[in-house]
Amino acid sequence: KEHPQGVSVLYLHTAFQFHLKRKYPKYKDGTFAQLGDFIWGPHGSRLASPVDFLHHDTLKDPSDGIHGVSLCHAIGAADPDYVGDANLFVSWVWKYNILEMIEALYAYCTEQELNPAKTFVWMCFFCNNQRRWLRPAPGSAPNGVEVFGRNLTKIKRVLCVVDDFSNAIYFGRIWTVYEVFLALLKNLDIDVTL
C-alpha cells in the first residue's frame, strides 16, 4: 500500500489560517473539535449539514466515487506542494486550540531545524476522510486501530503534542495512549512538545 499523505506545517501556518479567517469566525479561540462540528456538523448529527471547507465535500473520493474527501486530499487538489508523504505522525487531541496547535508544530520545526514546507504531518483531523468515519456506509466503518496503527508504523516518527504536563488532556485519551504504546512497541522515534 502507498505511503500515507500529510499536510505541510507551512500550509497550516499560512494558507490554512487564511482560510480559517475567511470561513470560521471562532478561529482565534476555537478548538479542532469545534471546527470539526462546523465543517462536518455537530457531534452526533451524522453530518446533516456539512460546510464545504476547502471543497472537501464536493470532490469525489477516487476510492469509492462518492463526494467527500479528506481535507488533506482537498488541500492537495488545490495545491500539490502542500501535501506529500507524511514524515511526522502527530499524536494529539481535537480539544486543542487551533492556533496554539499550529504554533506548536511550527515551533517544533524551528527547534528541530526542519523545513516546515517539507515537514508533512499526518493528523487524523486532516488526513482521515471524515465522511467515512462519521457517516460510513453500512458495514464499511473504518477500523481505527488498524488505520492509526498502519499509518504510524509507515511514518515511523511520532510527535506527541502534550497540552500540559501537570494536568494534560492528552493522557486522558485512549487514542493517544494507544499511539504511544504502539510507537514504543514498534521502537519508533518519539518526540514530545508542548
Image (cartoon, rainbow, N blue to C red):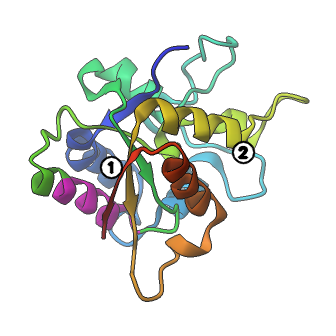
Give the residue displayed 60% in from the left and 17% down from the top.
61
Q: Position of residue 163 (x, y in %)?
A: 39, 74
Q: Quadrant of the N terminus?
A: top right
Using the rendered view, name the quadrant where residue 28 is placed.
Answer: bottom left
Q: Which mark is residue 22?
A: 1
Q: Earlier in the sequence, mark 1 or mark 2?
A: 1
Residue range highlighted in magenta: 97-108
Q: Position of residue 92 (x, y in %)?
A: 47, 59
Tell me the CA gap for discs 1 and 2.
Answer: 22 Å
Q: Is 189 drawn above or below residue 170 in the view shown? A: above
Give the residue displayed 57% in from the left and 56% down from the top.
181
Please give the residue where the numbered disc 2 appears in the rendered image. 47
Q: Position of residue 109 (x, y in %)?
A: 17, 50
Three-letter residue code for mark 1: Arg
Secondary structure beneath dot 2 equals loop
Give the residue displayed 57% in from the left and 49% down from the top.
182
